[in-house]
Amino acid sequence: MSVNKVVKKITTHVLYEMKLKGEKIAMLTGYDYSFARILDEAGIDIILVGDSASNVMAGYETTLPITLDNMIYHAASVVRGVKRALVVVDMPFGTYQGDSKEALSSAIRIMKETGASGVKLEGGREVADSISRILSAGIPVMGHLGLTPQSIHKFGTYVVRAREEEEAERLKEDAKIIEEAGCFSIVLEKIPARLAGEVAESLKIPVIGIGAGPQVDGQVLVLHDMLGINQEFSPRFLRRYHNLYDEVKGAVQNYISDVRAEDFPNEKEQY
Ligand code: KIV
């Protein structure tokens, strides 16, 4: 029987079991109560309250401006809509990189004020101290390697990472380092599929890919991209499952026409 059929609540332990049994993990981002309810009822395993909220919810160009207070607001809304999925919250830029004590207090705020089950942060060896410190308070940590959007000004571009041997080797080392530091899972973003497969194979913890091919333990997409709400973003790895932008626009246009034609509300739609 699949691990998921007998599971009432997804925990980090359930995710390890899924990896052991070769069952793929399905993760999506979520930022609000209403969508979180739909994702949870549909059976998603992990909802990531991603700092991509900075782009898709707030309209910023990068993930850098979103604040800890903003992330806490989104995460608490998501948690209120969820019964089963594991909710993981991105630690925003500037709340964990400089100093592991600050990382711990940011993570504690997230856990206390949202009710989420873990945090995610970007980076390898340079954030290993922060990862260990957060874990010392019993807070599960998910890592994130490859394309790390909080470092966009260092990379200068969102192209595929770790194509060259040197960067690929460093990524493999970083994955080991943050697994040893205690991460319960790692996201690999936009790296060659073969490299992602090698990393997943070499680690005990589940590896979740985005633009990292099929040989990993699970997949994640940004909700607004896979639903076709955001039409400007079309990387090769993105599969659009819906065209919600046009659907919503069409519904709004129908409503406007009905109001203008005095067709709404009709006799049954009044008291
Ligand atoms: O913020 C986010 O949406 C993410 C995913 C791309 C993994 O980190």
Image: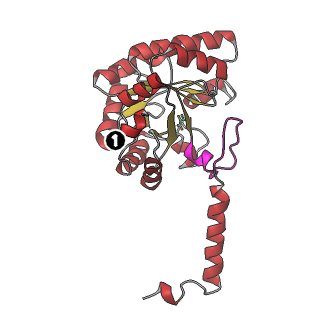
Examine the structure image and report whether residue 60 is included in the region drawn in magenta. Answer: no
In the image, residue 191 sits, relative to residue 170, either above or below, namely below
Asked if residue 105 lies left or right of residue 237, the reply is: left
**Quadrant where the N terminus is found in the figure:** top left
| Position in image of residue 50 (x %, y %) | 49, 39
| Position in image of residue 71 (x %, y %) | 43, 42
* Residue 5 in which image quadrant: top left
Asked if residue 170 lies left or right of residue 32, the reply is: right
Q: Nearer the viewer, residue 247 or 125?
A: 247
Q: Is mark 1 on a helix, strand or loop?
A: loop
Q: Residue at x 64, y 74 (%)?
A: 254
For label 1, being within 8 Å of ligand 1 is answered no
Q: Nearer the viewer, residue 221 or 119?
A: 221
Asked if residue 262 lies left or right of residue 232, the reply is: left
Using the rendered image of the protein, determine whether residue 97 is visible from the camera's viewpoint: no
Query: Which amino acid lies under the numbered mark 1 shown in the image of this protein?
Result: Lys
Here the colouring is: secondary structure
**On the image, numbered disc 1 is attached to which residue?**
8
* Residue 257 in which image quadrant: bottom right
The crowd level at tag 1 (other Cα within 10 Å; few <14, some 14-19, many 20+) is few
In the image, residue 140 sits, relative to residue 249, either above or below, namely above
Q: Quarter for ligand 1?
A: top right
- Per the picture, the main secondary structure of the magenta-coloured stretch is loop
Q: Which residue is drawn at 62% across and 81% down?
A: 258
Q: Give the range drawn in magenta.
A: 222-241
* Residue 109 in which image quadrant: top left
Q: Which of 257 and 8 is in front in this view?
A: 8
